[in-house]
């Protein structure tokens, strides 16, 4: 499966805080660093077409400045669990526009219209929603500022992630 993400360009203290939460509560912590997912896992026959499409989008995308300052518990749309998201209160519109632009052209058929897009960084997963809600409440208040300077096309086999291509923003 392929996936397109942007890793967080944030300060060391914020990275330590986020990755500390993930270490204790996110089963994907050992697979990939904290990130925004722009295109969720999908199968595609031509990686070259995906690279070309993503390169075109990245070439016209400015660096995104964001602020994470809200946490939310969200029921996972694809598994019987609840997640804790850190949500952008600044930069959300730019991240949403990037998501929408990526799901055009060759990736248009990959869009899951049944799952609403929410810009987020996942930091935890729980079997019970009340546990996720408790953690979301306990995390606030916080303020993490950062930038998205690139996006990565990754291959995910269910256990490991391989970076196939990095696309710098302008």
Image: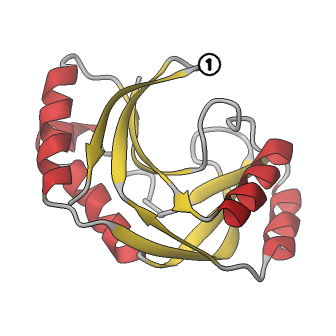
Q: Give me the residue at 67% from left, 60% from top.
A: 12
61 or 105: nearer the viewer: 61
Q: Give me the residue at 21% from left, 61% from top.
A: 61
Query: Picture coordinates of residue 54 (x, y %)?
Result: 20, 42
Position of the N terminus by quadrant: top left
Disc 1: CA contacts within 10 A as few (<14), some (14-19) or many (>=20): few
76 or 61: nearer the viewer: 61
Q: In the figure, is residue 6 to the left or right of 128?
A: left
Q: Give me the residue at 73% from left, 64% from top.
A: 13
Q: In the figure, is residue 165 to the left or right of 23?
A: left
Position of the C terminus by quadrant: bottom left
Hey, which quadrant is residue 163 in on the image? top left
On screen, residue 51 above or below 157: below
Query: Picture coordinates of residue 17 (x, y %)?
Result: 77, 61
Query: Picture coordinates of residue 156 (x, y %)?
Result: 48, 23
Query: Picture coordinates of residue 149 (x, y %)?
Result: 36, 57
On screen, residue 161 above or below 99: above
On screen, residue 79 above or below 42: below
* Residue that label 1 marks: 159
Circle 1: element type:
loop
Question: In the image as oriented, which residue stretches furthest toward the front?
Answer: 12
Q: Is residue 127 visible?
A: no
Q: Is residue 97 visible?
A: yes
């Amino acid at each position: 499966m392929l996936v397109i993400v942007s890793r967080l360009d944030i300060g060391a203290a914020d990275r330590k805080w986020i990755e500390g939460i993930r270490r204790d509560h996110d089963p994907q912590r050992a697979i990939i660093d904290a990130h925004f997912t722009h295109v969720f896992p999908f199968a595609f026959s031509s990686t070259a077409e995906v690279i070309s499409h993503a390169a075109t989008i990245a070439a016209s995308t400015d660096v995104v400045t964001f602020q994470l300052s809200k946490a939310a518990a969200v029921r996972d749309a694809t598994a019987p669990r609840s997640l804790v998201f850190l949500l952008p209160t600044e930069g959300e519109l730019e991240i949403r526009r990037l998501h929408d632009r990526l799901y055009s052209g060759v990736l248009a058929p990959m869009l899951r219209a049944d799952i609403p897009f929410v810009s987020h960084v996942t930091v935890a997963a729980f079997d019970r929603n009340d546990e996720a809600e408790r953690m979301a409440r306990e995390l606030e208040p916080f303020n993490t500022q950062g930038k998205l300077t690139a996006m990565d096309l990754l291959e995910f086999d269910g256990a490991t992630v391989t970076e196939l291509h990095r696309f710098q923003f302008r």
